[in-house]
Amino acid sequence: MYQLLKFQNFVFAFVLYVGSYFVSGILFPLLANGAYEQAYEMEQTNTLFAIPLYEKALSQKPSGKLQKAVVSRLFFLYKKHSKLLDALFLGSRFPSLIPSKDRSWIWNQLTDIYKPINVSELSSTYVLATKANGENSSELREHLKQRNLPKLYEFSSILLLKRKQYKVILSLYEENPSMFLTPLFIGISELKLDTEQGKEFLKKILTDSDKERTDQEKSDILYLMGVHYRQSNEHELSARYFRMSGSFFAKPRADLEASKSLVLQGKTKEMCSTFKFFVSPFDEIETLLHYHCSPNGTQSSRPIFASIRILAEREGNEFLNVLYPKDSL
């Protein structure tokens, strides 16, 4: 261990001396290799929480055999834990490193979800949605307009949200509002771009009393109110609206988001007594809430603390810094 520390110190000194060229040439691969080893070790005991560590390793720009190993393990775990969108984006980014049969699995899953739309329609929409941005979205808009299918608009909106292309979503809505069966994607985009703009959008849909709304629409509107109040640091109101949204539709989503708002208020005991969470094979956040509320929560959380710290840095997961402070384990 002492020899390794000495070598790492030498590398850092060498990078500082030689200059920025070696930051990508030596330092990043060294860090990626360490992250890969940490991820691989985690995978032996907890595959779900190995995912953030592999993602960290990939962000540090590995190359050659190390890159192939990171991508291969990450794709395998995305598939194992049904993280379909993540697998889709990874497969597109590294098509030569992922076998075609595995990439076909993604599209088979998507065609099941978006029946009766075929794989050709979905794949062409995906290509255009991953290219679109605020300055150039005409191809995607024209493609969707010709198909005129609400499910394709939904698929595009999910992809665009993942890419944080909120202006493109708004442009799709402005051009063809009848294709959006719920205000969810528009509301999130408005709130992400500008809090006041989002507030005005919510006022508008709340005063539209003439429209008869489905339970899903009612749930999504209340969910958006919860998002708005959380952005305004009014966490008590936020939790209330999230809970109300679950009375109409998508209760698991409502319980998770209400729990986050309660944690941000410092009401972790109330959160644990109000909601019941389980170890999820698909969702790290639900699993962490279960661990925290369990009698042996600290014991369960300690081995995955490195993954918790990565997750806490991501947008929407700020509550993890309250639930699991840096010096808590």
Image (tube, rainbow, N blue to C red):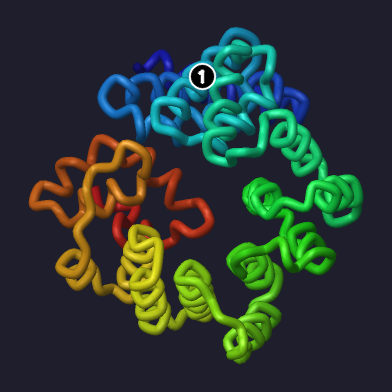
Against 205, is 169 above or below?
A: above
Question: Dot 1, how many residues are within 10 Å of its Cα: few (below 14), some (14-19), or many (20+)?
Answer: many
Percent coordinates x, y for residue 88 in the rendering: 61, 31
**Residue ID at (28%, 73%):** 266
Lateral position of residue 82 relative to residue 107, left or right:
left
The percent coordinates of residue 60 (x first, y second) are 60, 29
Which x, y percent locates residue 168?
79, 57
In-front residue for pair 120/91: 120
Secondary structure of residue under mark 1: helix
Report whether residue 314 is seen: yes
Residue 79 vertical position relative to residue 140 in the rendered view, above or below? above
Residue 164 in the image: state x and y as whole percent.
68, 54
- Residue at point 53%, 19% (across, down): 70
Q: Quadrant of the N terminus?
A: top left
Q: Going by the picture, which residue comes out furthest to the front?
A: 116
Give the side of residue 131 with respect to residue 315, left or right: right
The front one of 54 and 74 is 74
User: For residue 143, what is the image quadrant?
Assistant: top right
Question: Horizontal placement of 186 versus 311: left or right?
Answer: right
Label 1 sits on what residue type? Asn
**Tag 1 residue:** 33
| Residue found at x 63% / y 13% | 100
